[in-house]
Image (cartoon, rainbow, N blue to C red):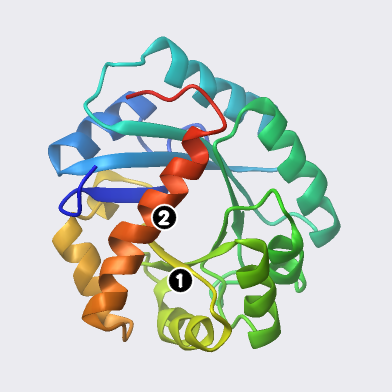
Amino acid sequence: MNEHQRIDLHVHSFLSDGVLLPSEILRRAAVVGHGAIAITDHADASNLDAIVSSLVRFAQEQRGDFPLTFVPGVELTHIAPASIAPLARRARGLGAGLVVVHGETIVEPVMAGTNRAAVECAEVDILAHPGLITLEEARIAAGNGVYLEITSRHGHCLTNGHVVQIARQSGARLVLNTDAHSPGDMIDQEMARLVAAGAGLTAEEVHVVTVVNPQALVQRALSRYVPMV
């Protein structure tokens, strides 16, 4: 992976509400210049085991099929705050390289307290589209190594500027993802930089959220399972 290759750590396949097979996602990602990608399908207790097991099996059995690094993950979505920690631990035990939590975006009725429960959980890697996250929550995220997401996803992106400001005040780390559900949602590295700049980040910060921090998260994930490379 190099700074010119895109890393996207929040993508959905048809194992939840995306429209593509994992293989097609990786093929399309490779064509548009990705160096690594994570599939993080929506999950709760009803489908968590099936999703993570399927993605881990895909990573193992089709290892080497695509010229990029693949990370099997999961996005815990619209679950009660009290269920976040136990389901995150289960996902990790099943082999998820990344655990994402669907944050309190302003365009969906996410339960209050979700952001707080996510940043307090040691098994969570990314709090996706955290909406109007508070400074206190962001400080907890910084202390626990939970990354806050800024996003190119319509609706969710409306609070990118707020997330950037809170991250600066708290020291929380940021990562830019797409939350892609279809081919048209994928972006290349140049567009990722433009989205980050549009959120108010400086040139140095843009590099951090599109290169440095994604690479760090991939390395964290690779320490947890046998990757597809």
Name the one closer to the observer, 37 or 182.
Answer: 37
Q: Quadrant of residue 20?
A: top left
The image position of residue 59, as x and y in percent, is 44, 21
Residue drawn at x 48%, y 85% is: 168
Is residue 11 shown left or right of residue 136? left
Mark 2 = which residue? 179
- Residue type at the position of mark 2: Asp
Residue 156 visible in this rendered orientation of the protein: yes
Residue drawn at x 70%, y 84% is: 136
Q: Quadrant of residue 185?
A: bottom left
Identify the secondary structure beneath mark 2: loop
The image position of residue 56, as x and y in percent, is 53, 22
On screen, residue 105 above or below 38: below
Is residue 43 shown left or right of residue 16? right
Q: Which mark is residue 186?
A: none
Identify the secondary structure beneath mark 1: helix
Residue drawn at x 53%, y 86% is: 166
- How crowded pointer 2 is (Cα within 10 Å; few <14, some 14-19, many 20+) is rated as many
The image position of residue 7, as x and y in percent, is 31, 49
CB-based contact (under 8 Å), mark 1 and mark 2: yes
The image quadrant where one finds the N terminus is: top left
**Total label count?**
2
Is residue 176 shown left or right of residue 94? left
Report the residue that reaches farthest toward the top: 61
The image position of residue 82, as x and y in percent, is 85, 57
Q: Quadrant of residue 48?
A: top right
Rounded to the nearest whole Å, what is the CA distance between mark 1 and mark 2? 9 Å
Mark 1 = which residue? 156
Q: Tell me which label, 1 or 2, sits earlier in the chain.
A: 1
Residue drawn at x 33%, y 82% is: 199
- Residue type at the position of mark 1: His
